[in-house]
Image: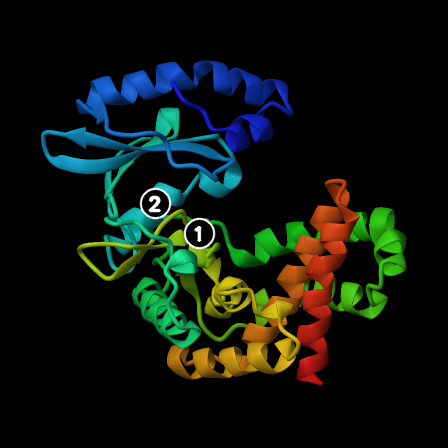
């Protein structure tokens, strides 16, 4: 059975990961037996938290996903069931005990980041999907349970504080503004509680997780859902759709994108931008803690550009 190097490398760092890799062929075989599936191609590459491959059954084409057990994947199937195909792929079957899902297959499946579309068209596609995903709002108290954004972001802020203490000096030496580091952590703590709306957010709405489909022009995959501020979701689309931070006038381009999305999504532009600073600070500190301060400093330059453009 093919296991792509990215997935193997990511999971070989712990005894639990090695054990999961050893069990993975049996988990795939069990899913194929239970759901009467045939593997219909090589696994999709690029993922580090799950084995994903096209399959075929008597009902047609689908995708089999076996996730590495981790907190962000715990409610993925719950979110897909909640959205029921509105803006996302449909959940066809699930085995929670093995962290295994059978999913609707997107054809041709081209990621939005690779579609070669003008950036304005890409933003419009993303905005349409986000409005569809958020359309049901937040679950009632007796409905599906998701982690709250406030709880998750408080945990992230605590981790960021520890990483700042350990790696802040190295990042400042690489050109990071220490004030932006502190601001980003403060925003992680304060933004969730000041939101005027609560929805089930996708949680990782980057243009690699938006695929060209048949049932709809594009559909979202691979959510990391939380209940909280919808302004959290657009940032990955802003920052990763043709990577505007590489441009000489990055601040102008990024703010123009934020302003346009704010109108389409009925959100305050300032909140979208603030989440950008918070998330890039979190990402930069994570990269430094993972042994790559140069990557962390690059991420933090994006936060600095966004923060400066807001002044």
Q: Secondary structure at mark 2?
A: helix
Quarter of the image that includes the N terminus? top left
Q: Residue at x 44, y 39 (%)?
A: 74
Q: Is residue 159 among the parts visible in the rendering?
A: no
Residue 202 placement, left or right of 149:
left
Picture coordinates of residue 222, whole percent (x, y): 40, 47
Mark 2–mark 1 contact, CB under 8 Å?
yes
Tell me what residue is drawn at x 41 percent, y 57 percent. Answer: 114
Total count of labels: 2
Q: Is 181 on the left-hand or right-hand side of 129?
A: right
On the image, the x and y values in percent for residue 304 come to 73, 71
Residue, disc 1: 225
In the rendered view, would you say 51 is above or below 147? Answer: above
- Work out whether residue 194 or residue 304 is closer to the camera in this orientation and state it: 304
The quadrant of the image that shows the C terminus is bottom right
Q: Quadrant of residue 115?
A: bottom left
CA gap, disc 2 to disc 1?
Answer: 9 Å
Q: Residue at x 18, y 30 (%)?
A: 56
> Residue at label 2?
78
Q: Earlier in the sequence, mark 2 or mark 1?
A: 2
**Which residue is at a point 45% across and 40% down the rendered structure image?**
73
């Amino acid at each position: 059975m093919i296991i792509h190097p990215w997935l193997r490398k990511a999971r070989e760092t712990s005894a639990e990961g090695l054990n999961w890799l050893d069990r993975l062929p049996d988990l795939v075989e069990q899913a194929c037996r239970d759901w009467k599936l045939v593997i219909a191609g090589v696994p999709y590459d690029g993922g580090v938290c799950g084995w994903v491959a096209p399959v075929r059954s008597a009902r047609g084409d689908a995708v089999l996903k076996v996730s590495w057990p981790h907190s962000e994947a715990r409610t993925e199937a719950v979110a897909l069931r909640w959205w029921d195909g509105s803006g996302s792929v449909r959940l066809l079957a699930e085995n929670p005990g093995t962290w295994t899902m059978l999913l609707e297959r997107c054809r041709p499946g081209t990621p939005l980041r690779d579609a070669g579309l003008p950036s304005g068209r890409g933003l419009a596609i993303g905005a349409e999907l986000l409005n569809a995903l958020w359309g049901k709002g937040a679950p009632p108290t007796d409905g599906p349970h998701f982690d709250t954004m406030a709880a998750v972001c408080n945990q992230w802020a605590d981790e960021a504080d520890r990483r700042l203490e350990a790696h802040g000096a190295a990042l400042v030496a690489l050109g990071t503004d220490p004030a932006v580091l502190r601001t980003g952590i403060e925003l992680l703590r304060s933004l969730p509680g000041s939101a005027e709306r609560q929805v089930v957010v996708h949680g990782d709405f980057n243009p690699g997780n938006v695929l060209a489909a048949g049932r709809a022009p594009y559909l979202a995959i691979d959510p990391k859902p939380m209940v909280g501020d919808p302004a959290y979701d657009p940032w990955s689309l802003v920052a990763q759709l043709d990577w505007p931070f590489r441009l000489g006038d990055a601040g102008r381009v990024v703010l123009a994108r934020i302003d346009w999305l704010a109108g389409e999504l009925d959100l305050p532009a300032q909140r979208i931008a603030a989440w950008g600073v918070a998330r890039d600070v979190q990402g930069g500190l994570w990269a430094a803690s993972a042994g790559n301060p140069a990557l962390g400093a690059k991420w933090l330059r994006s936060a600095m550009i966004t923060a400066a453009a807001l002044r």
